[in-house]
Image: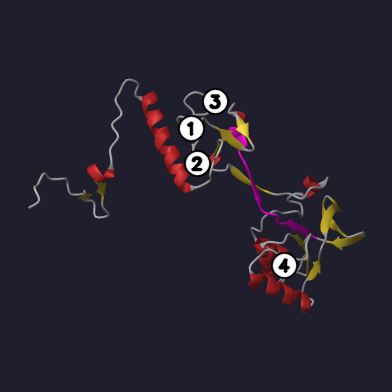
């Protein structure tokens, strides 16, 4: 099974009651930009996603407000410059440094509350879009009885990257062990050792023959076998 870092979920704002308005005005992804036409929108975040959607939705939204907890934005310079230009032209509202701390409404989202220093700002909103990035979650894998450490599966890296369950291996980004490096090169190394160990479990008593591409060759794009020239016994004059 392929797990990687697990399933990715949106990083949600940390205040009570937000779940009451999810998909009722609070969205973590923009799937259909047309639903925001002529609407009051609050976007929160300071990265490329927040900047890009502010720029795009400002073309059709009735009113759009960008809230960020810092004055500085971590995004492409061109996007930051465009947002600055939109602010200067009064096409968007920008509130920094500030954070959304409460939402309210009757069945659907109606109001977003922003705190800037000691000031509380009440904003009429049809949609609130928090764009704080994604966080990995193992999902159902975490219920398999595997030993988990910081959202990763612990393995025995001294031998074959086997988990605490016999016959279950974990390699790549999904595992963790002392000295772990999240590099593709390390994943290849883990896979090689895991495959040898798995072969012995699947084929008990069968000898494992390790072959090298320099000897056995590799299949070329044209379907032919590419093989290095073999060594010869020859004297040198």
Structural distance between the alpha carbons of marks 2 and 4? 43 Å
Please tell me which residue is depicted at 31% across the width and 29% down the height of the picture. 208
Disc 1 crowd, CA 10 A, few/some/many (<14, 14-19, 20+): many
Q: Residue 200 appears at what percent x and percent y?
A: 37, 25
According to the image, label 3 marks what residue?
164
The disc at residue 39 is none
Structural distance between the alpha carbons of marks 2 and 3? 17 Å
Choose top left, top right, bottom left or bottom right for residue 204: top left
According to the image, label 1 marks what residue?
161
Structural distance between the alpha carbons of marks 3 and 4? 53 Å
According to the image, label 4 marks what residue?
37
Observer-nearest of 118 and 35? 118
| Location of residue 95 with respect to 152 vertically, above or below | below
Q: Nearer the viewer, mark 2 or mark 4?
A: 2
Observer-nearest of 57 and 216? 216
Structural distance between the alpha carbons of marks 1 and 3? 10 Å
């Amino acid at each position: 099974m392929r797990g990687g870092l697990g399933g990715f979920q949106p990083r949600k704002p940390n205040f009570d009651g937000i779940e009451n308005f999810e998909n009722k005005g609070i969205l973590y992804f923009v799937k259909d930009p047309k639903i925001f036409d002529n609407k009051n929108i609050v976007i929160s975040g300071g990265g490329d996603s927040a900047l890009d959607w502010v720029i795009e939705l400002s073309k059709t939204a009735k009113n759009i407000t960008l809230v960020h907890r810092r004055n500085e934005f971590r995004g492409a310079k061109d996007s930051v410059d465009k947002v600055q230009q939109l602010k200067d032209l009064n096409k968007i509202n920008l509130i920094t440094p500030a954070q959304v701390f409460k939402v309210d409404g009757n069945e659907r989202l109606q109001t977003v509350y922003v705190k800037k220093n000691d000031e509380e700002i009440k904003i009429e909103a049809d949609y609130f879009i928090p764009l704080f990035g994604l966080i990995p979650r193992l999902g159902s894998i975490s219920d398999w009885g595997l030993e988990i450490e910081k959202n990763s599966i612990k393995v025995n890296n001294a031998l074959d990257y086997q988990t605490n369950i016999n016959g279950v291996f974990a390699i790549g980004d999904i595992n963790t062990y002392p000295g772990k490096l999240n590099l593709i090169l390390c994943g290849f190394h883990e896979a090689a050792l895991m495959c040898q160990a798995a072969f012995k479990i699947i084929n008990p008593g069968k000898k494992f023959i390790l072959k090298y591409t320099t000897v056995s060759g590799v299949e070329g794009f044209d379907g032919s076998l590419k093989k290095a020239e073999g060594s010869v016994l020859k004297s040198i004059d």
